Image (tube, rainbow, N blue to C red):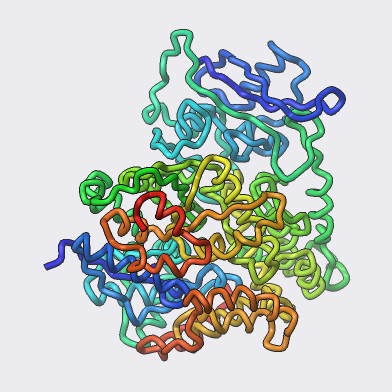
């Protein structure tokens, strides 16, 4: 019997271009004796984009996901993506605070025999690590401390704002759960202004140069504070930061080449798992130099 | 209480670049940042320049950056900043006695009538006033708004901000000849306009916007919410289609969905009104643009498979026949392919995907 059971919502990106995130999550879950019950019939959370077309759609789609979790007897849905976390929490917040929205959602769910009673909470993996396992216990499980690594956290907007529902339990202007984890893993957390700012992912197709500049701005802030790599809890941030740093050379912010780890990859490294078992070699910004100097690869 | 204010100073007639000047001031516990600045101006240095008028969060003059975050100085108690950042005034990734700036306030509507007075947002039970014993309770860093040129000290030139508001035509274009009496509005119609009407043009959202910080062509959250959305949703207005075209030309779709504008001191929450403006432009058929195509193709792939299909979204957004646009993303696509990070070309639909289509049918039938 597993120690903890969670509804698992990997989100689209971890099942498409960032499969290594899903992989690393399972590695960490096994080490922690978690049973992740994948909500395999769940849909996309709406990823903020669906709100730009229809305000009801994302809410109803997420109500169906929550109903799937409830039907399995699960009250906590574990997410590994800031964007999923924020938009599922937004949907839940709206459903719980507006009877009409809840009724509308349940009217359509009833057409295929489902119901959502409002008991599901979506939590980011980082929050679950903090609240259910405890940073001190994670520290005890470290077998290969990431000594010498200087790591900047990149939170991702949607686990910070709007604070009415994104609330991680910390001040969104000065959060600390990621830095606490970095420290517990034996590395040095680098605090920089860009850590709570936007990566620009959502507008890369609208105007790529804006994303490139936003990436350049944030990564230059991290570099200037001494960061040598980045860890993020959002695969969308990962994609933007990982892919566009090479292009940010063309910006006023200058060259940065900080490898961008997914949160569970970093934890698994400290738990002694080999980097190639975590898909780190798939990242576009090469991590080997940083890993070699930390004595990992 | 004794507090250390690090104020950014700049006098273009004397200084080559802005510099920081520290003032240790003794102000009553519960003072706002604005009260501390007024104390400096009255007692210490009359040349310190900043805008202020009402001191009660209704005129929108005193927007500035406090510990790197922007807001109204008259609505920001010093104790609140100390509770967020500690004594250093710099984000340090450590827990302090957190008090939400929204604590104790109704989300919206009530906020318009109940702007908190100095210290009211900080319950004394949460943060016990420290006795200072001649020691400062901490540092607060004060600077001008971001994204606008500095005139002097904390005063910025708001010209671009006003130009962008004007570019969206902040006036009613009547549908028909004016009625004999007033234009009637239902409570439901009024409700939609209530939120943007609370905007006081303080520019906090504009100053916080990361897109504006790197691209001046983005019209910005305040103009979209207060002018764009406000008139797109006014049933008395007769120029909805033209407005939809104008707001798209002013780069509505450059909003990065970062929700930085959710720190609105008047709870207008521009990010939500930006999304509703996007909805309105699609309703008006202004869809031959990247942003609208993106929203529609994302929804389309979810309808088909339950997934946001990355491999479909890119060509669907740029246009399948947009050879220049597609060739510009090819190098990145190739690198992803070589690294084994290319998303699958087709996703197998999630179980019971017909339920998702049923949800689309229900949602598409609704507007508000």
Is residue B285 among the parts visible in the rendering? yes
Write the residue at 62% across / 31% down. Answer: B74
Instruction: Give the side of residue B175 with respect to residue B367, left or right.
Output: right
Question: In the rendered picture of this protein, how many numbered marks are placed on residues?
Answer: 0
Figure quadrant of residue B114: top right
B284 vs B22, left or right, is right
Judging depth in this view, the residue of B326 and A13 nearest the camera is B326
Of residues A85 and A66, the one drawn nearer to the viewer in this rendering? A85
Above or below B186: residue B89: above
> Residue at position x 60%, y 34% from top?
B66
Asked if residue A123 can be seen in this view, the reply is: no
Residue A11 position (above or below residue A133)? below
Say above or below: B234 vs B357.
above
Q: Quadrant of residue B93?
A: top left
Q: Farthest residue toward the left?
A: A1
Q: Position of residue A264 (x, y in %)?
A: 35, 60
Q: Relative to B169, does residue A11 appear above or below in the rendering? A: below
The one nearer the camera, B235 or A272, is: A272
Residue at the farthest top position: B134
Q: Position of residue B29 (x, y in %)?
A: 50, 19
Image coordinates for residue B365, horizontal then vertical, percent: 55, 84
Quarter of the figure with the C terminus of chain B: bottom right
Would you say A262 lies left or right of B266 here? left
* Closer to the camera in the image, A268 or B230: A268
How far across and down, in percent of the image, does residue A124 sit?
37, 59
């Amino acid at each position: 019997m597993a120690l903890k059971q969670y509804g698992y919502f990997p989100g689209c990106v971890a099942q498409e271009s960032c499969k290594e995130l899903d992989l690393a999550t399972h590695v960490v879950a096994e080490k922690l004796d978690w049973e992740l019950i994948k909500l395999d019939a769940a849909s996309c959370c709406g990823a903020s984009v669906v709100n730009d077309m229809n305000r009801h759609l994302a809410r109803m789609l997420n109500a169906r996901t929550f109903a799937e979790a409830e039907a399995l007897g699960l009250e906590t849905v574990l997410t590994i993506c800031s964007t999923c976390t924020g938009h599922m929490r937004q949907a839940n917040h709206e459903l719980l605070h507006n009877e009409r929205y809840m009724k509308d959602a349940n009217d359509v769910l009833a057409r295929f025999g489902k119901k959502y009673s409002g008991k599901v909470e979506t939590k980011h993996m980082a929050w679950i690590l903090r609240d259910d396992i405890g940073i001190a216990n994670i520290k005890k499980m470290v077998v290969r401390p990431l000594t010498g690594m200087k790591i900047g956290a990149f939170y991702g907007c949607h686990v910070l704002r709007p604070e009415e529902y994104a609330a991680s339990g910390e001040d969104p202007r000065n959060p600390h759960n990621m830095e606490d984890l970095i420290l517990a893993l034996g590395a040095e957390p680098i605090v920089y202004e860009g850590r709570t700012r936007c990566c620009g992912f959502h507008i890369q197709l609208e105007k790529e140069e804006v994303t490139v500049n936003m990436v350049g701005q944030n990564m230059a802030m991290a570099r200037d504070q001494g960061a040598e790599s980045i860890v993020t809890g959002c695969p969308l941030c990962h994609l933007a930061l990982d892919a566009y740093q090479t292009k940010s050379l063309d910006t006023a912010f200058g060259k940065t080449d900080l490898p961008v780890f997914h949160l569970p990859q970093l934890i698994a490294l400290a738990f002694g798992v080999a980097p190639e078992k975590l898909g780190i070699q798939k990242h576009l910004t090469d991590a080997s130099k940083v890993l070699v100097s930390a004595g990992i690869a | 209480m004794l507090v250390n204010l690090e104020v950014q100073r700049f006098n273009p007639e004397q200084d080559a670049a802005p510099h920081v000047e520290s003032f240790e001031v003794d102000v009553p516990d519960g003072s706002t940042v604005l009260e501390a600045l007024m104390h400096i101006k009255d007692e210490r240095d009359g040349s310190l320049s900043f805008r202020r008028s009402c001191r009660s969060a209704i005129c929108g003059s005193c927007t500035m950056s406090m510990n790197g975050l922007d807001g109204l100085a008259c609505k920001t108690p010093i104790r609140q900043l100390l509770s967020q950042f500690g004594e250093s005034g710099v984000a340090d990734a450590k827990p302090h006695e957190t008090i939400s700036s929204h604590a104790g306030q109704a989300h919206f509507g009530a906020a318009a009538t109940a702007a908190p007075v100095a210290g009211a947002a900080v319950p004394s039970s949460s943060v016990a006033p420290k006795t200072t014993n001649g020691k400062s309770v901490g540092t607060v860093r004060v600077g001008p708004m971001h994204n606008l040129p500095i005139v002097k000290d904390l005063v910025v030139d708001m010209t671009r901000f006003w130009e962008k508001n004007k570019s969206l035509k902040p006036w009613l274009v009547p549908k028909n000849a004016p009625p004999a009496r007033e234009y009637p509005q239902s409570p439901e119609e009024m409700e939609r306009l209530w939120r943007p009407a609370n905007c006081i043009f303080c520019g906090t959202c504009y100053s916080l916007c990361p897109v504006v910080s790197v691209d001046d062509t983005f019209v910005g959250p305040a103009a979209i919410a207060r002018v764009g959305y406000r008139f797109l949703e006014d049933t008395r207005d007769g120029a909805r289609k033209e407005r939809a075209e104008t707001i798209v030309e002013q780069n509505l779709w450059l909003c990065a969905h970062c929700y930085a504008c959710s720190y609105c001191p008047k709870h207008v929450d521009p990010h939500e009104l930006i999304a509703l403006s996007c909805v309105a432009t699609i309703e008006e058929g202004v869809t031959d643009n990247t942003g609208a195509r993106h929203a529609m193709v994302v929804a389309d792939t979810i309808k088909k498979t339950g997934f946001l299909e990355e491999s479909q979204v890119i060509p669907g957004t740029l246009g399948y026949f947009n050879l220049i646009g597609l060739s510009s993303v090819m190098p990145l696509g190739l690198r992803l392919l070589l690294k084994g990070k290319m998303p699958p070309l087709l996703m197998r639909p999630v179980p019971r995907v017909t339920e998702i289509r049923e949800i689309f049918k229900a949602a598409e039938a609704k507007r508000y």
